[in-house]
């Protein structure tokens, strides 16, 4: 025998259950879980850091200087195929590790990089790459980001044709990672 | 069904209305997180630094615009390296001024990496 009393209580119970379920849904949905697919967020921060450092290096230090530190590093007295890797190492690590309260030594924040210079070989009509500097060998297990900076430098590159110094646009590429 | 009490029909109806509205609100919330995610990824994928960088080098190269042979080398460098190392088609033209009293430089810049296309007509200060 079905008793039809208490309908209001039943409805109230159903409404309360819905409200509780909805609250639980909201609470669970508000927590963010850091999934492997979200690594692009920290990648983006690292990429911005490296880009800013390279941009600072490619800016003349004051109004009286016509060349930027990065141009001087690449020029290296015009020695073909070589660059001032030590100077790049010091300046780049200074900039990327330049934080309040941090002691600047060899990568205190665990930042490592591998820098190369890409140029266009006019004679072969190919692009070549020359090593610039690195403070850690790439082992293949890293998860680096690539940051680049275009530099115009008055220097002869392989396949440049002749010895006259003409301005060349080269691409400084830095693989930057943290471990 | 003879003894069924048909009181409180309004309350039952309101209960349905409330539960359905809650359901649709939950659907909206669910969609909003998805939309936020795809929007954020779209912003991250935009090659902001590439465009700024290539614009920077192009405007810097315009200081050699008085020497066509130097500009030709720089243009070839930028075009080839952007294509082979950055996967982007970059072309630019330094537009000669028709008016002799115009001391500004005019450059038309094109950038296309297959996803993002960017065109700019740059005029020096």
Image (cartoon, coloured by chain):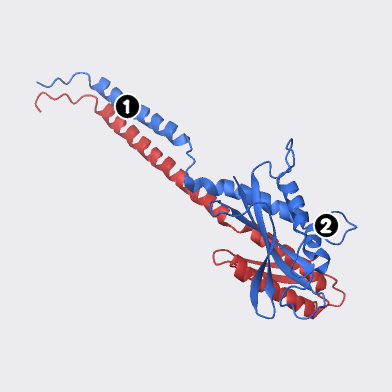
Chain colours: A blue, B red
Provide the chain ID for the residue under circle 1: A
Give the quarter of the figure containing the C terminus of chain B.
bottom right
- Give the image location of residue B4, x and y in percent: 13, 25
Q: Secondary structure at mark 2?
A: loop
Q: Earlier in the sequence, mark 2 or mark 1?
A: 1
Q: Nearer the viewer, residue A66 or A122?
A: A122
Q: Is residue A58 left or right of residue A47?
A: right
Q: Is residue B66 above or below residue A96?
A: below
Q: Is residue B47 above or below residue B63?
A: above
Locate residue A22: give its quadrant. top left
Q: Is residue A102 above or below residue A93?
A: above
Pointer 1: what residue? A17
Tell whether label 1 touches label 2 (CB within 8 Å).
no
Pointer 2: what residue? A60
Give the quarter of the figure containing the N terminus of chain B.
top left
| Labels 2 and 1 in the same subunit | yes
Label 2 to label 1: alpha-carbon separation: 67 Å
- Give the image location of residue A78, x and y in percent: 81, 69
Q: Can residue B94 be seen? A: no
Q: Residue at x 64, y 43 (%)?
A: A110
Q: Is residue A6 left or right of residue A96?
A: left
Q: Residues within 10 Å of mark 1 (few under 14, many from 20)?
A: few
In this rendering, the label closer to the viewer, 2 or 1: 2
- Give the image location of residue A55, x and y in percent: 73, 55
Q: Secondary structure at mark 1?
A: helix
């Amino acid at each position: 025998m079905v008793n039809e009393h208490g309908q209001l209580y039943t409805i109230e119970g159903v409404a309360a259950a819905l409200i509780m379920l909805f609250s639980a849904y909201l609470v669970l949905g508000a927590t963010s879980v850091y999934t492997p697919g979200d690594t692009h967020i920290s990648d983006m921060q690292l990429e911005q850091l490296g880009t800013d450092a390279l941009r600072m290096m490619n800016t003349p230090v004051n109004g009286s200087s016509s060349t930027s530190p990065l141009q001087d590093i690449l020029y290296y007295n015009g020695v073909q195929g070589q660059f001032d890797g030590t100077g790049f190492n010091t300046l780049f690590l200074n900039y990327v590790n330049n934080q309040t309260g941090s002691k600047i030594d060899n990568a205190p924040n665990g930042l490592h990089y591998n820098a190369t210079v890409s140029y266009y070989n006019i004679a072969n009509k190919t692009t070549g790459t020359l090593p610039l500097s690195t403070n850690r060998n790439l082992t293949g297990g890293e998860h680096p980001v690539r940051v680049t900076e275009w530099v115009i430098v008055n220097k002869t590159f392989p396949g440049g044709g002749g010895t006259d110094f003409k301005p060349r646009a080269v691409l400084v590429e830095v693989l930057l990672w943290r471990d | 069904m003879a003894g069924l009490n048909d009181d409180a029909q309004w309350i039952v109806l309101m209960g349905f209305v409330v539960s359905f509205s809650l359901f649709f609100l939950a659907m909206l919330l669910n969609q909003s997180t998805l939309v936020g995610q795809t929007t954020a990824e779209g912003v991250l994928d935009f090659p902001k630094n590439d465009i700024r960088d290539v614009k920077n080098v192009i405007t810097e190269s315009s200081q050699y615009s008085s020497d066509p042979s130097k500009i030709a080398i720089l243009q070839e460098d930028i075009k080839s390296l952007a294509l082979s190392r950055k996967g982007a088609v970059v072309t630019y033209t330094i537009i000669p001024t028709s008016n002799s009293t115009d001391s500004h430089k005019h450059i038309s810049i094109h950038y296309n990496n297959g996803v993002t296309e960017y065109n700019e007509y740059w005029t020096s200060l």
